[in-house]
Structures are given as C-alpha cells and as structure tokens.
Amino acid sequence: MTKILLNKVFVGEYLDKNIGHEAVCLFKADNGEHYIYVTPYGEVSKTNELKENDYILLVRSGIQKKFLEVIGYATGLECICSKEFLKCKSNNKNDKIEAQKEWIKNVNIRYGGALLTEILESKNTKKSDGTEYKKTAFYTSFRAKKVKLAKEKIYITRDEKYITRDKEEKEKDGEYENICYIPYTFTRNTQYLYDGLLLGKNKDKVKLEKLIKVIENDKFWDDNIKKIYLKAEDFECLVKNENLSFMKIIGKQNDELAFSNWISYWLDEDRELLAKFCQNFTNTEIDKENTRIFREYENIDIYIKDDKNAIVIENKIKSGINSIKQDEETNELTSQLDKYYGVAKEKDNEGKEREVKCILLLPNHHNIVKEYATEISEKIYKTSKDIEYKILTYADIYGFFKKYFENNKSKTDFEEAMRKEFLKALEPHTKPYQNELYETAMYRLVKKIINLNKQH
C-alpha cells in the first residue's frame, strides 16, 4: 500500500533566525544526489518509516485555511537518519546526529561548494526564561532517486466542495484536476496518509487515487532541479536584490495600522493622486480641494469624504471581518462593515443620505480574496445586509501607485526614497500566498554559502 508523507515546509519560529533545513530539498547536491529533510527535526519514526516507492510531498500553507499547496515531491526513498544506516550503536539523539555529521563529511554532501553541516549549523534559541539552547536536529532525512518541483498550482484541500461523489460530478472533476480532496486534520509539521484511513469530522475514508494520479502526471511537474554551482560573485546579485524594506526591519510588515497610515499619507499629500485613486477604484469624482481624509474615524481605517460623496476603506492584512453579531429577535447578522456604511451614509451627514462607496482592501494571499475570486467575476464582498464592499487587492494598489509614481516625478530625493520603500513594503502582499519565510530561507542559504566559500 502506497504511503504519502505531507511534509510542511517553511513554517515555525526556528526560521526567524536560521536557515530552514528544508531549503536544500529544492536543489541537487554537488554530487548530483537529492536529499530531503523532514520537518521539524529530521526524524522519521520506525512505525512510519517510508519505503522506496512511497512519496514525500513538500507542502506549504495554501490560499485558504482549508488548503495546502504542493510545491514538490520525492520518491525512491532511502532513510538516512535511522540508527541502522548511520551504524551508530547509541540510542542518544546527539550521538546519532554526530554520526550523521561524520557520514555527511565522508560522503562529501555539498551545495555550491559548502559542506551541508556547515551550511545548516543553527544559532542558539532562547527559552521563555531567557536561557539559550541549541535545537538538536538531523541535517537530512532521506536520499531520493527522484525529486520534482511543481510547475502548475496543485492543492490538497479538506473543503467538501471538491469531493466527487457520482458520475456527473466526476465528469465535472476536470475543472478541479489540480485540487485533491483529503479530509485531513493537518498537524503543525507532518501528516502521513494511507488509503482507507478514517479522517476528518465525518470519518471519511482517505482515497489517495486522485492524489497519486496528479503526482504521476508529468504536466504538473518540472524535474529540471539545478545544483547550486554559481560562483560567489554571481550569488552577490541575489543577495543585493533581496527585497528588504524598512517595514520588514521594524517588524511592521503585517501591521494594518502602519499601511493605512502610509496609504492615507500619499492620498492626502497629492490631491491629483487622490482624485485618480477615487475615480479608478470607485468611479467617484471627488472635490479635490474640499475632500478630507480621516484615519480611524468611528473605527473606519481610511475615510474619504466631501459634501456629496464618502468612501470607506477597511484594510485587512491578517485579520478577518470583526464584530459579527446576531440580533436575538430578528436573528439578523451584522458586522463592523455594516456599521461603517451606516456612519458614512447618514450618521456623519446630519441624517442626510449621501453617495457611499465601500472598499475592502486585502492582500492577495487573504482567504477572502481567493474565496470571492473563484466564485464571481466581479470581486464584491456583500455583508449580511447586502451592503457591497468592492474587494481591492494589494496588487491593485501596488500597480496603481507604481504607475502614478513613474508618470509623476518626485519633488525631492527624500520623496523618491519614500516611494521606493512604500512599493517595497506593498510588494510581499501582492502575491497569492505568504512567501516571506521561503524567500528569507533562500536568501540566508545563498548568503551562508557565499560566506563559507570566502572562509575556505
């Protein structure tokens, strides 16, 4: 029976300071071999040890909570973290790791000329009491005969929408050829899948037939995995181009308040920009001279208004829709979005109605974006009272600001620097998934190899 290990990569606090050991899964070693690391510590239990024809899927958090994205797979597996393979008589984990370090040195496993154990040497981690310790982990878990990376989007989901129950649904399944339904309860790092295993709230039987069919379909995969063979000076370009922004440095990359402040600044500072923004995204012609912009007015993130119009912008990065309440008598649901519309429509206009447009500003990796982008062509979020919020993505505003900045020169060098930093900060949120940990791991891997090569 085929066994599949879902290996969740590029997650966890360890990556805050260290290179994720899983980074090397995406490259061939200098000796032409493939090595796979199983998170979090490289160990594989004897009861779940994989055989040669089993599969390891490299997965990361997907576009929604119910999805995992498959980024690669490995098969033709040989376990190299076991006691038997390392010929280590001790059951002590530290002894086994030292034995693996010696084995790696003898086999000469290198990436870009640097020894694997030196690349992945971890920094000390602090406990809650402030004391430091070094996490004990193997350096690699498996040697694999075949590794391929996804060239098409492939997802595993527990969303029951993607179950094929009968003949008609199977014919429709072509629409979701790249989405495999598995009723899993996914753990933090790894999950083993077996045919017939009972999983999920409905105790559904896991059927791996479709997932294996996707794995065996060459159209989804790229087997042209490269070695890291470039010279150090070539790597320097990659390091210099790493998208490090001021917001990342101060730890505000996911701060809704900070982004709302910055967006409001540009709109308030340049009235021509403000007019184009309102026209472009809400088809509203505002009075440029008399329009006012507020931050956190009645808790509205960005509030734009003149005598005839009002625009409500609710900015969400990691959070969802808040303050959802149900009326005890009518059972009617309301949320913060209903309240903001009411404020703009009448409360803030002495009871007189005005034209109100509402925007829900979201990163492209936000759950709501994916949900509404797949259901309808016009991306509109409707509240329980049928109030329409236009879904505006960070990619939308990134493109808008970038084009405006290119067509309108900065007045000062400082303003030009501010513009560049603003676009750098927006850019990570324009992607369909949060990719920061992956990009950081690649950056650190390259940088470490450069430094090691310079030392030797």
Image (tube, helix red, strand yellow):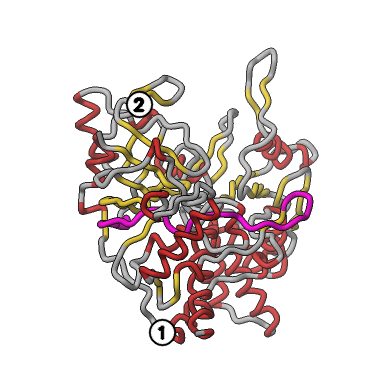
Q: Mark 2: give few (<14), some (14-19) or many (20+) Cα within 10 Å.
A: some
- Label 2: element kind: loop
Q: Position of residue 428 (x, y in %)?
A: 54, 61
> On the image, numbered disc 2 is attached to which residue?
197
- Label 1: element kind: loop
Q: Nearer the viewer, residue 182 or 399?
A: 182
Q: Residue furthest front?
A: 89
Relative to 72, 451 lies left or right: right
Q: Is residue 292 above or below residue 68?
A: below
> On the image, numbered disc 1 is attached to which residue?
231
Residue 357 visible at all: no
Q: Identify residue type, mark 1.
A: Lys
Q: Identify residue type, mark 2.
A: Leu
The residue lying at 68 percent from left, 53 percent from top is 256
Q: Is residue 142 magenta?
A: yes
Q: Position of residue 392 (x, y in %)?
A: 54, 51
Residue range highlighted in magenta: 127-150
Q: Nearer the viewer, residue 231 or 319?
A: 231
* Among the two numbered marks 1 and 2 on one chain, the one whose residue lies closer to the N terminus: 2
Q: Is residue 446 above or below residue 49?
A: below
- For marks 1 and 2, give the CA distance: 48 Å
